[in-house]
Image (cartoon, helix red, strand yellow):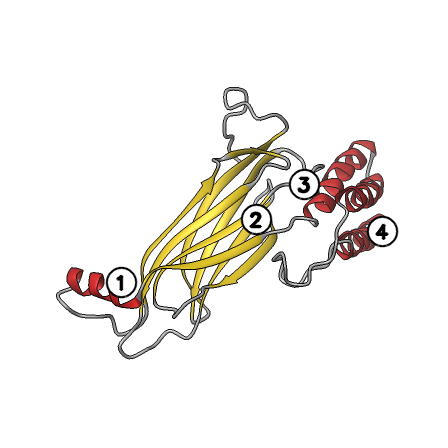
Amino acid sequence: MKQATNRVLLLTLATTVVLSGCATTGGVAGSGEKKCNPWATGAIGAVLGAAIGATQDSDAAAKGAIAGAALGALSCLVVNAHSRQTQSADVVQAEYRQANAGTLPSAPKLVTYDTNISPGNRVTSGQAVEIKSNLKVVDGTQQRISSIREDMVLLDTTGKEIKRVGKDVSGTQTGGYENTFAFSFPKGVSQGVYGIRTELLVNGQVVGRNEEDLQLVVDYNPAAYPIAAR
């Protein structure tokens, strides 16, 4: 019971200390984000992770150090988000009418939602990653659009959410848009297969979702590092 209590206390301390090393306001660059030292937070995470594991055995201490270091490094992840309109509301509505016997939906309708990762599904630490979404939304005749937001969610190698960044769609809301989230994995992050999920919210409700795997490797070599299952 005492060891379990100690693990809980140490885990709470680890999370608080590591995340305080890189406090953000939404996780979007240019939004008052504080400077973050990935090596410092990674080292703190490693020490506290090892301490947590040490309450069990030496192997657990080693695994805890690795996990703690990864948590510390990922806490420094900075995401740049941008949005631009690609088609006007009139054009998108005309396309919808043509495909639906001249009618418009009574409630807002997501027509298109595609997400792609550039430069691909394998990257190295420090390499630029760009998550780009293309979407089209039609306004409703009875229920109007008041807000459109896209969230990019980064999942760790176990599928746990570790970072979420939201971006409000610019322009007149209804129409066609391109959203871009850009970041790079800082040094010290463990290699493995991470998850990228994008969610589109209209009037606060999720109306579309896309998921991709992104493999982080030490040295970029497509032949040596095929995408592995998480």
| Amino acid found under the numbered disc labelled 1 | Val
- The outermost residue toward the left is 101
- The tag earlier along the polypeptide, 2 or 4, is 4
- The tag earlier along the polypeptide, 3 or 2, is 2
x, y percentage for residue 227? 50, 30
Give me the residue at 26% from left, 74% from top. 106
Q: Is residue 213 left or right of residue 37?
A: left
Q: Is residue 75 left or right of residue 54?
A: left
The residue that label 2 is drawn on is 154
The residue that label 4 is drawn on is 6
Q: CA distance from mark 3 to mark 4?
A: 30 Å
Comparing 88 with 66, the one in front is 88
User: Circle 2 sits in a helix, a strand or a loop, which is it?
Assistant: strand
x, y percentage for residue 179? 45, 55
What label sits on residue 92 in the rendered view? Answer: 1
x, y percentage for residue 198? 47, 53
**Neighbour tally class for label 3: few under 14, some 14-19, many 20 plus, Cα within 10 Å:** many
Q: CA distance from mark 1 to mark 4?
A: 58 Å
- The tag earlier along the polypeptide, 1 or 4, is 4
Mark 3 near mark 2, Cβ–Cβ under 8 Å? no
The residue that label 3 is drawn on is 186
| Amino acid found under the numbered disc labelled 2 | Leu
| Amino acid found under the numbered disc labelled 4 | Asn
Q: CA distance from mark 2 to mark 4?
A: 29 Å
Please tell me whether mark 2 or mark 1 is closer to you in this view: 1
| Amino acid found under the numbered disc labelled 3 | Pro
Residue 149 position (above or below residue 48):
below
Q: CA distance from mark 2 to mark 1?
A: 30 Å
Mark 2 near mark 1, Cβ–Cβ under 8 Å? no
